[in-house]
Image (tube, coloured by chain):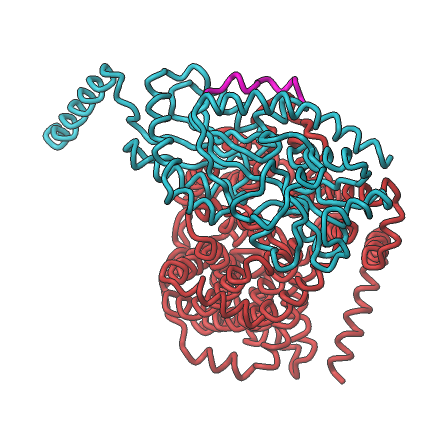
Chain colours: A red, B cyan
Amino acid sequence: MHGILSGGLETFLGLQQILLTGFGVFMGIIIGVLPGIGPLLGVILFTSVVIHISPVGGMGLLIGVYVGGSCGGAISAILLRIPGTPIAAATLLDGYPMAKKGKSPEAVGLAIVASSMGGLLGGAALVFVSPLLAEIALKFGPPEYFALTVTGLIAIAVVARESTLKGLLSACFGLIIASIGTDPFTGYDRFTFGYGNMMGGIRLVALLVGLFAISEMFIQIEQGGLNIKPNIKAFRPPFSTVLTVLRNFVNLIRASAIGTFIGALPGTGGVASSFISYAMAKASSKEPEKFGTGMPEGIIASEAANNACCGGALIPSLALAIPGDPITAVLLGALMLIGLLPGPELFRQYPDIVGGLFLAYLAANIFLFVLGLLFTPLFVSILKIRKNRLIPMIILLSIVGTFAVQASIFDVWSMWFFGLVGYVMRKRGFPLAPLVIARVLGPIVEPAFRRSLILSGGSFSIFVERPIAFVILIFNVILLIWTSVPPDKMRSARVALVRLISKRSYS
Amino acid sequence: MLRVLKIPIALIFILLLVGGLSSLGYAKYPTRPLMWLCPWGPENESVAMGRMVAEEMSKILGEKIMVNAMPGGSGAKALKHVLSQPADGYLLLDAWVAPLVFVVLNRPDIGYTYRDFEPIGHISFMPFTLVVRKDSPWKTLDEFVKHARANPGLKYNATGAISVPHAVMATFLKKAGIRARGVPYPGLAGGIKDFLGGTLDFTIGNFWVKAVYGDQTRTLCVFLNERHPWFPEIPTAKEQGYDPGFGDSGMGWDTLAVKKGTPKPIVEKLRAAYKQVATSEAMKAKLKKLNFWLVHKNPEGCMKLWEDSTRNLKEGIEILKWEKAQFK
């Protein structure tokens, strides 16, 4: 691990890499502040840029957008009571009341400081845990990979906020899209309808930009209010918020630990981590009744957790090539675009690049601290941009970005098509995240399954005989059974669980 | 208003005039950037190789050459794309043996053959090797063959299911009287982890494997007619009596090509520019760092390689089918 970090210094310490990471954070905060455009969309829009930059510089840019975007949403949550991103929803609970009391500079300052510190703690976990995990994963063969990817597929569908059935359906749709193109085992075409352009499958960037960016623009246009300009005054957060956060270090460390752990679980992400962390902070507080009225602790718990979550989510993504959420799925896609195959082999072949990515992540959180506090007035005034200026800009960026990846007009048409698909799916309450995860995991899970059967000569016993694969598969079965429990029974079980946890933390 | 626009309008007219005159002259090629199309994904080393060669060529031609990766259908997507574009010499194809010859043999319905392309010059050869782990009991090819004959069902990384390296390895194994299981992976790199981790017993290798994993592996033989100058210590399979018999066709190779029907003067200009780059020692050394063995061949030599490979590799397709049927 020492080698990884020192190698990383060489690849990261260059003007281009550092500036790009800082720029990424800056753009990330702006993207996070704008309602409706979260870090996911930001990372997607910037993905097409990275192929023209050095690997660490390009990924630094994306990681910066990821980190900045995960924090930026807090600003609009606090000031407008609209979370810029869903992951800032828990921040709203105490952030908005604080702003109403006239303490918006303090609230925004707390959010930024807590985010960057939580992110740094999550980064520490990333640096220590992921090389170990990669070391273990080197022993994993096709059966283990098959079992692991199935876990990823089930988990993302299950934790989807909408119904599990719709989540699973969405994941199946993603798997079907993943199977378009040439069958890797026979060389024959699947679902290409004799169309040469589809031999390579649907490009991930086109799919993502369509599903998320284009469909979001449709929905924004539909919602109206294209000319509204909120009336907000710019301000600068006081530096004393740093001290407030440090005084709450127990809360900070707990929130970061929760965020990292939940981020590392496949399927769960920022939203869950910030709410759980908020609940835990409330439960262990001496004055829980004051939560929701503008408690700084509430903001710290939520923001530290959702940024630590980024570091956590990167752990399985880099070490196992199994993304924890849609954003890391896109990051993995970008990594492949620039010619690096994520997974345990990456740690062995390119330790310097892995180290560079670690440092970019840590640096992004430091940038978040500095840029966030320095440019708050600017970020606040971003909220005044009208939608009728913003929407055409984003659509233009989407088209250019999608085209730039492979100079292919077919990709642009795919983008529009999936824009419509995404719009319809959202209208009917189908979650999009399982589709994306399935599109990324599909090309891993299917060959892993078929490869396992070739290894065993067609016998399914290979999944039982190998202990690690067997244990993971059993876990998958439990997960599936757990989800088939009716929701009302589940709710009472969940309440009991929360009670149990909060009792423990009192004693 | 009009006064403001005067200068831009005048400039546009001048540009149109110059453009019109130069297009009359036809011999002016190239007048805009070219594209070098690689049929593999951006993670493939051949994209980096393409950038190096393209950069030197663009210095000679005086226009930028952009390198674009277009994976899909074992490379067939890129070849089909070239054929769908005009034959104007602005789209160069890095034609690898897999899409140009092997895919066509496997799928005669694919819609093109090598005759639809015009060679510019040969780029590289990539000889294949047989590699085992350093901790394995087999020190020589003979020991390996003896063990594998007695223990049918050893597993190896076959790279692509329908690929030239797989065909070479399967043919070698069959002729040596060995029945083994070829496990397909996305390319050589995709299966190296399972090979090193112990899931597989041996692997198809090349000089990249030797360079990157030399300390953990042992290369038992190389599938060449003679020992390779880079690694004279590696014996050939042929000298030990196990020749798969493909000769030059049994290597990974690629040729720079354009669509057939490209005007003769343009083809000649490209050939001259490419030859100048490909015969320079500096470029050879550069590509060696990426483990590409740069060997220049004239256009006739390229055509012969295309024809020979189409003839020789046909047997490989049959042997792949045979191998697949062994462990049902």
Frontmost residue, A359 versus B12? A359
Q: Residue at x 22, y 21 (%)?
A: B19
Q: In x, y percent, where is residue A291?
A: 62, 74
Confirm whether residue B46 shows in the render.
Answer: yes
The answer to whether B50 is drawn above or below residue A37 in the figure is above
Q: In x, y percent, where is residue A423?
A: 59, 37
Q: Residue at x 43, y 25 (%)?
A: B298
The answer to whether B231 is drawn above or below residue A289 in the figure is above
Frontmost residue, A119 versus B50? B50
Q: In x, y percent, where is residue B119?
A: 46, 23
Residue B111 is one of the magenta-drawn residues: yes
Quadrant of the rendering where the C terminus of chain A is positioned: bottom right
Quadrant of the rendering where the N terminus of chain A is positioned: bottom right
Q: In x, y percent, where is residue A351?
A: 55, 62
Frontmost residue, B94 versus B235? B235
Q: Residue at x 10, y 30 (%)?
A: B3
Is A231 displayed left or right of B185 in the figure? left
Quarter of the image where one finds residue B108: top right
Report how many numbered discs are placed on residues in the image. 0
Residue B155 is one of the magenta-drawn residues: no
Frontmost residue, B133 versus B63? B133
Q: Which residues are magenta?
A: B107-118
Is B230 displayed left or right of B235 in the figure? left
Confirm whether residue A432 shows in the render.
Answer: no
Q: Residue at x 57, y 37 (%)?
A: A203
Q: Residue furthest left?
A: B3
